[in-house]
Image (cartoon, grey):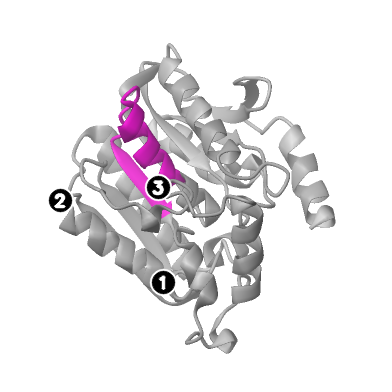
Amino acid sequence: MGVVRGLTGAAGKRAPSGGSVERVDEDVSVRVFRPGSGPAPGLLWIHGGGYVIGSAAMADPFCRGVARHLGGVAAAVEYRLAPEHPFPAPLEDCYAALRWLAAQPDVDAERIVIGGESAGGGLAAALALLARERGEVRPILQVLSYPMLDDRTSERTDVDPRSLRLWSLNANRFGWGAYLGAAGEVPPLAAPARYEDLSGLPPAWIGVGTNDLFLDEDLAYAERLREAGVPCDVHTVEGAYHGFDLVERRAGVSREYVRARIAAVREAFSGSSGG
């Protein structure tokens, strides 16, 4: 884990091509791409890595594309990682970044999309819940790319490990253990699948592959959102494994997946999302 952290951490310290690194507070920074005019809609993206590794730099291509092609101010948050910083620190870091983005003079605070992949998708789902609780910023869409939502998946015994790549049951158990720390009873904001009331949340886009450990928990969350009256578009990729679009960026299925995700953001920015 230390080697991977070192590599991703080094990348995160370099300013992104076409963007900048800006400080939110003493614990949090964001990598920001601006279209050059405003007020513009905003995107807050949260990177994956099982809550224990990863860097905001992972989102540079996606955020750069949102700024360049959709005209949005796209910011990826560098949140603190577990196990050194378990829940709620990473979520509070993301919330601080959301408030920072909404306060930027070139951002339309009424048109902010939040999203992320894997653990970042789980944090984005939790951020939507936290934003609803606090009522300061109201995101218009949550983009959840194979989100890590339910710690109870780690205890499943019916999963064939041969169907999984990149993220296994053991890795999932480690990630959740690091993030939850000594929390005791799992707080619903730590594992959004445990949150009872999903009403009043922003519309959601959920994407996941059929060979992803998170398939069932993601589909179950989508169904619960719909039952709560929240529009939810589900994009299922046949045969895709966890993180496939990051590992095989040039593959046709990955390009199509990213296009679908971009389309959801474009619709929200234009005010035509919600079904």
Residue 179 at x, y percent in the picture: 61, 52
The one of 54 and 264 positioned closer to us in this rendering: 54
Q: Which mark is residue 125?
A: 3
Label 2 crowding class (10 Å Cα cut-off): few <14, some 14-19, many 20+?
some
Residue 205 at x, y percent in the picture: 32, 53
- How far apart, in angstroms, are the residues tagged by discs 2 and 1? 21 Å
Q: Quadrant of residue 105?
A: top left
Q: Is residue 259 magenta?
A: no
Q: Is residue 132 magenta?
A: yes
Residue designated by label 2: 229
Does 35 sit left or right of 2 as displayed? left
Label 1 crowding class (10 Å Cα cut-off): few <14, some 14-19, many 20+?
some
Dot placed on the residue nearer the N-terminal end, 2 or 1: 1
Dot placed on the residue nearer the N-terminal end, 3 or 1: 3
**As shown in the figure, which amino acid type bears the numbered disc 1?**
Leu
Residue 140 at x, y percent in the picture: 28, 35
Residue 52 at x, y percent in the picture: 68, 52
Q: Secondary structure at mark 1?
A: helix
Q: Quadrant of residue 221?
A: bottom left
Residue designated by label 1: 215
Q: Secondary structure at mark 3?
A: helix
Q: Which mark is residue 12?
A: none
The one of 164 and 57 positioned closer to us in this rendering: 164
Does 254 sit left or right of 27 as displayed? left
Q: Residue at x 61, y 57 (%)?
A: 50
Dot placed on the residue nearer the N-terminal end, 3 or 2: 3
**As shown in the figure, which amino acid type bears the numbered disc 3?**
Ala
**As shown in the figure, which amino acid type bears the numbered disc 2?**
Gly
Which contiguous range is marked in magenta? 124-144
Report the residue that reaches farthest toward the top: 105
